[in-house]
Amino acid sequence: MADQQLSGTTGRQLKIGGDLPYFDTRVELRDYVQAFEELGFDHLGFGEHVLTARVPDWPAGISPCEPWHEAFTQAAFVAALSTRLEIAASVLLPLRSAALAAKQAAEIDIFSGGRLRLSVSVGWNRAELSAFGVDPADRGALLEEQVQVMRLLWTEPNLTYRGRFVQLPEVALNPRPDRPIPLWMGAGDFKTGGVPRAVLLDRIARVADGFKFFGPLMREPQNGLEVVRKLRELVVAHGRPLEQFGIEARIPLQLVDEREWLALLDFWQAAGVTHLCLSNRRGAGGADAEIERLTRFRKLLDEHSINHPMG
């Protein structure tokens, strides 16, 4: 597999989607989701915190009181409001048992008609992990075991599993999804500017179906480019098909001058990413203002005549 292309386009059409901002009300969430789908975007993502705890390295400019919604609940809401969007939910997997997360993901995928793309991570807030009885020192090994168990529950009619963290005695998940749900990973933290440590990049390339940029990485395209290059190199080194591995980069629409939007889009497409997320995370202007921003991007994109899969 050494002859696989390690830079530039993968030959796959670029999927363009975005983030669901932090809105307080279900009305704003509803309006945004429905407008997002009507504009023809491909995927809509969101992260979560189950609990928030202010810690010494809490990022400046982000309030711990943001209205973070539990990811699986929000995924069900988005599924009910849409018919076509891929639901790109990001969950803090160690906060749940592997069996419960597998069940919740399977139900979302079944009820949405196979539209879930699940991203999992260990979380950067150690206080949040500790509140759920998770030893931060074990979170990486726990995550890998959970991912293995979830995939087995989705595909095996009966499962006995005895691991370091997960014990399952002859159990089954019914109903199972019609496919192995895509399981991506996120990694990186505020201290590193979103760049994952080498051990985390290796885990992603070895275990995950794709990688989703952590927020700070989207502000430094050159750092992101190096992450893309290294990940593709590692995927090949682990003997995995490069064309089946996804990478989602981000454009922070609220932080970048509008005149630079399309240049960044071209930059990431040339880098060979498979997905692009238009980051509108804060939602400070309300749903109407954020929808207007997306509408301007869509208009620019149409005028740009980029080769993309949106109708």
Image (spheres, rainbow, N blue to C red):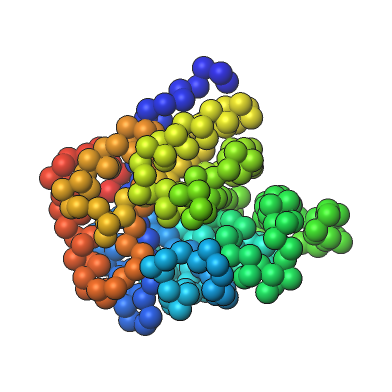
> Is residue 251 visible from the viewing direction of this image?
yes
Among all residues in the image, which is located at the extreme left? 303
Where residue 280 sits: x, y (%)? Answer: 32, 62
Query: In the image, is residue 197 above or below residue 87?
Result: above
Query: In the image, is residue 310 above or below residue 61?
Result: above
Which of 68/310 is in front?
68
Write the residue at 42% across / 26% down: 7
Which of 229/170 is in front?
229
Write the residue at 59% across / 56% down: 121
User: Which quadrant, please, contains the N terminus?
Assistant: top right
> Is residue 111 visible from the viewing direction of this image?
no
Q: Is residue 220 left or right of residue 64?
A: left
Where residue 227 sits: x, y (%)? Answer: 47, 37
Q: Quadrant of residue 204?
A: top right
Where residue 21 sits: x, y (%)? Answer: 36, 68
Where residue 266 sits: x, y (%)? Answer: 26, 37
Q: Quadrant of residue 262?
A: top left
Which of 75/178 is in front?
75
Write the residue at 51% across / 32% down: 230
Q: Quadrant of residue 223?
A: top left
Query: In the image, is residue 246 above or below residue 62?
Result: above
